Image (cartoon, rainbow, N blue to C red):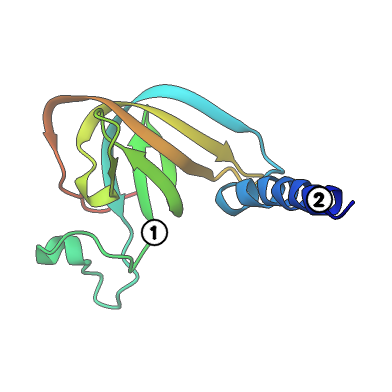
Amino acid sequence: MRLFHTFALLVVMVSLLSWVTPALAEDSDYPTHVMTVTVSDKYEESNNAEGVDSAEEGDGASSSGMQYVIAEQTRYELLETTTYVNKQGVEITPDTLPVPCKARISFQILSNGTRNLLSLKVLRKLSGATTNWSELPIE
């Protein structure tokens, strides 16, 4: 009987874990979309008073502001939980993401219209690809 209770407890714990874990990476209130796109650019919005982000200082992008990628003329917000994988299947960082590239992305569209990028898998680098961050586009 004790073995049955242990097994039942294990089943409950696993089901709870599988229910909680996806909520950490994405908001279950919004559907997840998957598309193959051309990622044309990546940039970071600076929160510094001087308006100079670390990408301009030459040490790569920092977490001082929001980070985005542009794909098919649409802006996707990068989250701390966004996963990035290169074409060999190795996890990479946003700083090593080559742009432009062809990629498969998964994202959610929030009620305010923001597109949160959940994952990005590089399918292939395109001509002229670089890992540099661009300056914030003037709107």
Give the percent coordinates (x, y) of residue 123: 29, 23
The part of the image, by quadrant, that contains residue 62 is: bottom left
83 or 30, nearer to the observer: 83
Residue in the picture at 62% in, 46% down:
22
The part of the image, by quadrant, that contains residue 109 is: top right
Q: Which mark is residue 3?
A: 2
Q: Measure the C-alpha gap from mark 2 to mark 1.
A: 50 Å
Q: Is residue 20 left or right of residue 120?
A: right
Element type at marker 2?
helix
Q: Which mark is residue 66?
A: 1
Give the percent coordinates (x, y) of residue 37: 37, 24
Give the percent coordinates (x, y) of residue 102: 28, 24
17 or 120, nearer to the observer: 17
Label 2: how many Cα within 10 Å (few below 14, some 14–19, many 20+): few
Label 1: how many Cα within 10 Å (few below 14, some 14–19, many 20+): some
Give the percent coordinates (x, y) of residue 83: 40, 44
Q: Is residue 66 left or right of residue 24?
A: left
Instruction: For residue 74, say whether it is visible.
Output: yes
Q: Is residue 81 left or right of residue 89?
A: right
Residue in the picture at 20% in, 46% down:
96
Instruction: For residue 137, say whether it is visible.
Output: no
132 or 10, nearer to the observer: 10
Relative to 46, say whether 67 is above or below: above
Name the kind of residue labelled 2 in the image.
Leu
Residue in the picture at 35% in, 70% down:
47
Element type at marker 1?
loop
Q: Is residue 8 left or right of residue 123?
A: right
